Image (tube, rainbow, N blue to C red):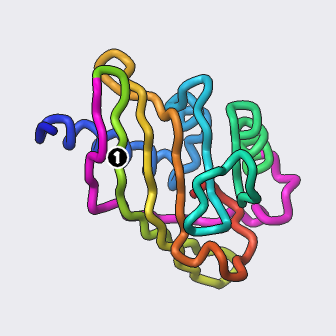
Amino acid sequence: MSLQLLQQVTAFIWQEGDMLDHGEYDAWLSLWSEKGVYVIPINPTEEDFENSLNYAYDDAHMREKRVVRLTGGESISTSPAPRTVRTLSRFRVLYEDAEYVTVRCAQNLREFRKDSLKHYSADIVYELERAGDGFRIQRKLIRLINSDDALAGIGYIL
């Protein structure tokens, strides 16, 4: 693994987090490969996401629907819209070849909504598809450290 690759994937992931915190959802959708999957499992050790219960298991169609709900004003969980700031750190390239790069990092996200400040921590694994000089998200796996606890309604994209 090269330092240049680590810098490239880190910059890409930071950009994605900034887009989410600033509500740039159309730009965020463009970061995904056509067959990309957004996964938030309930069971912290689950590996078979297709055959288990998840908080989210979104293909392209479901990601678009999620964005419509967030921006359409019809979802009670997004009115008023939450404000978020996320910190992404501890980047580690787990795998790379000519087509794909797998990266694990930590995310700490703060949400402020209705006079309440909440905190969510997670390990995130990104499976990135190389696309020219950049990347497309093939899979984003978000393992909340308290995923098997009772969670309040999350009205934004982790």
Left or right of 151? Residue 72 is right
Image: 71 above or below 75: above
Amino acid under label 1? Val
Q: Nearer the viewer, residue 25 or 92?
A: 92
Q: Which residue is mark 1?
A: 103
- Quadrant position of residue 66: top right
**Number of numbered discs on residues:** 1
What residue is drawn where x is 67% and y is 66%? Answer: 42
Q: Nearer the viewer, residue 15 or 123?
A: 123
Mark 1 neighbour density, 10 Å: few (under 14) some (14–19) many (20 or more): many
Image: 124 above or below 4: below
The segment highlighted magenta reads: 72-97
Image quadrant occupied by the C terminus: bottom right
Left or right of 80? Residue 95 is left
The residue most toward the top is: 132
What residue is drawn where x is 61% and y is 33%? Answer: 26
Q: Position of residue 123 (x, y in %)?
A: 44, 63
What residue is drawn where x is 30% and y is 40%? Answer: 95
Q: Position of residue 16 (x, y in %)?
A: 44, 44
Left or right of 150? Residue 25 is left
